[in-house]
Image (cartoon, rainbow, N blue to C red):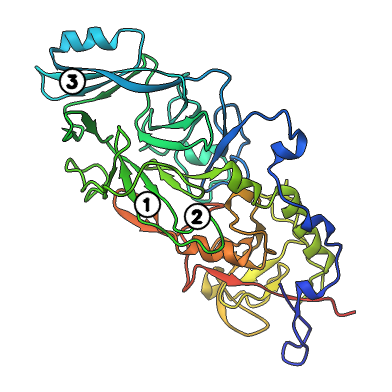
Amino acid sequence: YYFTGNNEKSLPRLLIRDLEFEKSSLTKPMFSPDQENHPSKTPVKYGELIVLGYNGSLPNGDRGRRKSRFALFKRPKANGVKPSTVHIACTPQAAKAISNKDQHSISYTLSRAQTVVVEYTHDSNTDMFQIGRSTESPIDFVVTDTVPGSQSNSDTQSVQSTISRFACRIICERNPPFTARIYAAGFDSSKNIFLGEKAAKWKTSDGQMDGLTTNGVLVMHPRNGFTEDSKPGVWREISVCGNVFSLRETRSAQQRGKMVENETNQLQDGSLIDLCGATLLWRTAEGLSRTPTVKHLEALRQEINAARPQCPVGFNTLAFPSMKRKDVVDEKQPWVYLNCGHVHGYHNWGNKEERDGKDRECPMCRSVGPYVPLWLGCEAGFYVDAGPPTHAFSPCGHVCSEKTTAYWSQIPLPHGTHTFHAACPFCAHQLAGEQGYIRLIFQGPLD
């Protein structure tokens, strides 16, 4: 954090690390909340899925299977499935009879006269978790379309959803190293997956069937894991059987991409899963143990506030509001000029009417640009390191560590049917400006 005195040129800048604070709370090993409470009783955690665009919870609060973060734990009893019998030349009636049996199956409709049905049998070595828009019981994690910057669920209701009702399934090995793999499509309440005549489908070289869902399930594995050294990987499409393909020309094109032989559907820490309307971040249990906790972020918030940053115009002390109050602008809330990074309290200086109230002139350096409130990024799972919150995404003003802003600003996230852009992970707003983020310059107290 940079603090400057009243006259920027004459006084040295203070880094937040130069100020003396109680650091003990920040040097403890970091564990996820489950591990903090009862380390021995916790069942094995495979990992967590975190929906991009939410700052710690859904706008109206997390409820049941609809929430911003979903933990996958080892089930008391295995519920995984694996392919078994393949029925090739089925009439529609025969296909219906097979899919009516009390077991899982995938039906591939080749024509009105012919359907291939693949029966799936119980697999005692794996657990299955299903994700989709449907609220029916087979779905473990209900995901709805993310509307950038939405403050309440009412903001999201009018959108026609592009997320599949049974979008994808994740299969986790019940034994170490607890490998998690992703597959397009999920089984419905009748334990079936139907790929109709229009869906892209084909016979593989070994005589098996495979296919793609309408809008597809895209996955991107970052290079170097999810760390401060991470770099974006390449977006791929995952098939119903878990094979990897290059992207189609547009999201729902009939023609599949090329098969990518040397890549797999195995999820790794930091893998991104796009369901065409919402993007999920996969964090492994091991990765989360190295991630800052909410307690750690709260300690950093208190550390910033203890340094008593001031508004250079009103000389009033600024303070980040508590993490529970992350929607309402507080009177002490810091605001920033996005072009230069100078932090102020809210004031009307430099608000020229002809600028429509959107652009303001910074009193410190006279640069003109947007003037927005700063919000702390509260979703710890999005942080690539435990550094102090010194940078903010532009144009939304969400604050986190420098390495975290640098990482997300270079990740192209799918948008619509065939475009990609970088976005703030805390609110899903498309990033703007040269870098998509700025370094914050605070002014220290005058006494």
Question: What is the crowding at mark 2: few (fewer than 14 residues within 10 Å), some, or many (at least 20)?
Answer: some
On-image quarter of the C terminus: bottom right
Residue 444: x, y in percent?
A: 80, 76
> Mark 2 or mark 1, which is nearer to you?
2
Question: Quick check: 138 above or below 307?
Answer: above
Question: What is the crowding at mark 3: few (fewer than 14 residues within 10 Å), some, or many (at least 20)?
Answer: many
Residue 180 visible at all: yes
Q: Earlier in the sequence, mark 1 or mark 3?
A: 3
* Residue drawn at 35 percent across, 52 percent down: 235
* Horizontal relation, residue 433 to residue 346: left or right: left
Q: Are marks 1 and 3 in contact (CB under 8 Å)?
A: no
Cα–Cα span, label 3 and label 2:
39 Å
- Identify the amino acid type marked 2: Gly
The residue carrying mark 2 is: 225
Question: Quick check: 134 above or below 357?
Answer: above
* Residue drawn at 55 percent across, 58 percent down: 227
Q: Earlier in the sequence, mark 3 or mark 2?
A: 3
Please name whichever residue, 444 or 280, is drawn nearer the observer in this view of the structure: 280
The residue carrying mark 1 is: 415
Please name whichever residue, 154 or 355, is drawn nearer the observer in this view of the structure: 154
Q: Earlier in the sequence, mark 2 or mark 1?
A: 2
Question: Quick check: 77 above or below 444?
Answer: above
Q: Secondary structure at mark 2?
A: loop
- Report which quarter residue 133 is drawn in: top left
Residue 55 visible at all: no
Cα–Cα span, label 1 and label 3:
34 Å
What's the mark number on residue 349? none
What's the mark number on residue 116? 3
Residue at the extreme bottom: 10
